[in-house]
């Protein structure tokens, strides 16, 4: 565990330290696209954050190769080299897309090629455990198709959810943490060396995300771009493929006795087989809904819009930070809930805890529907929107200075010099306020006449 933590810290440190220079490089090279209609941010923000994350990945693999307890992963398996090859290819495609906006079909082809490169070097699904039957071996083409499909789905799911500051990096970090606990338990608890590569991949992935998050939290100073989102999606998929399709579950000696007894005994093993999908359950759901929504409208499945889950949270009334935290909460609940159930599947309190936390999550989703107010003694510890409004004497209004006002309705001067009341929302004045409504600008149409410098 000490070596894994060291690898994680080195990866996070390299990613964090390189993100600042990468930001300056992105600004110098013009990797700051204009704000699009679906974007949430209001100022052009540099991309190419995936460059720092890729070098963090390389640093993590290099450090792990020189550690005595992790060196065996590189000696007994070719999976780290396969991961590095596929990651380099998908990273190059992402960098080109961040700079030149590559077509979606070209990116899809690059994702499939990157998955194929990993398959050719041995990182592929070899067998699948089936409840009641045991381990079912896959043919070469079956394993290849399943591997490519899992890689492409995971990459695009992470890419689709990358819409708010810190959202994709945080959700993938949570998923990687849950996956790390599961794979480490398989490797250390059952002494299966085949689970060691997945444990290393998830530790490095956590370091990449943790090192990038301080620069990417709201308000973000840099975006990871497709070079980062596709990269961490590929690393997450590689860990899932390694622990699911490379570890022989028969070695756990759970498939003994009758079929019914074997299925019940292997339940903790079968449940985490869904872990690669549960840890990205929210991104995958967002991906499926986006494809259905765009196809229903007659658009391309790759056409961008503002219908993603994080956009809907903002429309409901959540703030940017609260929407991100809600997505974090549901990701952690699903991922760690599955891992906890796989460890103690016979404990009913785990199910009850998951149900209770789900109810808490639903309450958080409905927060904009009401305005909670904190008690007086706690107002100093909560944001201003949760504090009670202070009701005091209102200052007198100088009618002669501000002009006559009737029933709170502002007046404006027409061309004849007469004042007429104008209700809110009238064409031409809707949305104006302050000095732009009836202040100095309306009294002095020409600034030069008022003695000001225009």
Image: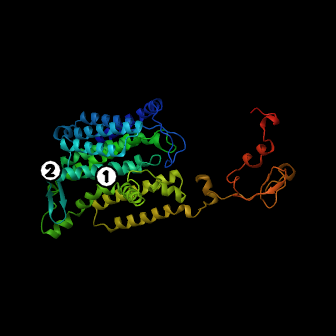
Q: Which residue is mark 1?
A: 153
Picture coordinates of residue 273 (x, y %)?
25, 57
Q: Is residue 148 left or right of residue 167?
A: left
- On screen, residue 334 above or below 238: below
Q: Is residue 249 left or right of residue 171?
A: left
Which residue occupies the foreground of this view, 320 or 151?
151
- Colouring scheme, one of rainbow, by chain, secondary structure, one colour: rainbow
In the rendered view of the protein, which quadrant contains the C terminus? top right
Residue 99 quadrant:
top left
- The local crowd at label 2, few if under 14, some if 14 to 19, many if 20 or more residues have their Cα within 10 Å, is few
Between discs 2 and 1, the one toward the N terminus: 2
Residue in the image at 18% along x and 49% along y: 192
Which residue occupies the foreground of this view, 30 or 211?
30
Q: Which mark is residue 140?
A: 2
Which residue occupies the foreground of this view, 368 or 37?
37
Picture coordinates of residue 334 (x, y %)?
36, 59
Residue in the image at 52% along x and 55% along y: 314
Tag 1 secondary structure: helix
In the rendered view of the protein, which quadrant contains the N terminus? top left
Residue in the image at 74% along x and 46% along y: 435
């Amino acid at each position: 565990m000490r070596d894994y933590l060291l690898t994680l810290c080195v990866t996070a440190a390299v990613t964090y330290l390189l993100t600042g220079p990468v930001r300056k490089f992105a600004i110098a090279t013009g990797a700051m696209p204009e704000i699009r209609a679906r974007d949430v941010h209001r100022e052009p923000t540099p991309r190419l954050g995936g460059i720092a994350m890729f070098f963090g990945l390389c640093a993590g693999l290099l450090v792990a190769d020189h550690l005595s307890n992790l060196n065996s992963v590189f000696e007994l398996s070719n999976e780290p080299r396969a991961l590095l090859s596929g990651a380099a290819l998908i990273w190059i495609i992402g960098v080109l897309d961040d700079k030149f906006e590559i077509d979606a079909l070209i990116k899809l082809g690059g994702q499939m090629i990157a998955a194929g490169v990993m398959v050719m070097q041995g990182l592929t699904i070899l067998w699948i455990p089936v409840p009641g039957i045991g381990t079912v071996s896959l043919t070469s083409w079956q394993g290849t198709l399943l591997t490519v499909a899992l890689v492409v789905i995971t990459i695009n799911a992470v890419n689709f959810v990358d819409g708010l500051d810190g959202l994709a990096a945080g959700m993938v970090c949570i998923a990687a943490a849950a996956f790390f606990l599961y794979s480490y338990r398989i490797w250390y608890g059952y002494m299966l060396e085949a689970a060691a590569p997945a444990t290393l991949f998830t530790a490095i992935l956590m370091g990449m995300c943790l090192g990038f998050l301080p620069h990417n939290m709201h308000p973000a100073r840099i975006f990871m771009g497709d070079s980062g989102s596709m990269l961490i999606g590929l690393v997450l998929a590689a860990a899932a493929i390694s622990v699911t399709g490379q570890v022989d579950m028969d070695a756990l000696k759970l498939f003994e006795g009758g079929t019914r007894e074997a299925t019940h005994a292997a339940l903790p093993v079968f449940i985490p087989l869904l872990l690669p999908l549960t840890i990205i359950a929210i991104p995958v759901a967002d991906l499926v809904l986006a494809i259905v929504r765009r196809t229903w409208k007659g658009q391309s499945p790759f056409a961008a819009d503002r219908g993603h889950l994080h956009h809907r949270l903002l429309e409901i009334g959540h703030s940017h930070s609260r929407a991100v935290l809600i997505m974090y909460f549901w990701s952690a609940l699903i991922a760690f809930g599955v891992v906890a159930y796989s460890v103690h599947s016979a404990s009913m309190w785990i199910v009850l805890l998951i149900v209770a936390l789900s109810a808490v999550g639903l309450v958080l989703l409905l927060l904009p529907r009401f305005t909670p107010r904190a008690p007086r003694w706690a107002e100093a510890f909560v944001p201003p929107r949760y504090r009670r409004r202070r009701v005091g004497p209102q200052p007198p209004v100088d009618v002669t200075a501000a002009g006559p006002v009737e029933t709170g309705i502002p007046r404006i001067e027409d061309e004849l010099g007469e004042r007429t009341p104008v209700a809110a929302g009238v064409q031409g004045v809707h949305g104006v306020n302050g000095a732009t409504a009836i202040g100095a600008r309306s009294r002095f149409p020409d600034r030069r006449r008022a003695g000001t410098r225009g």
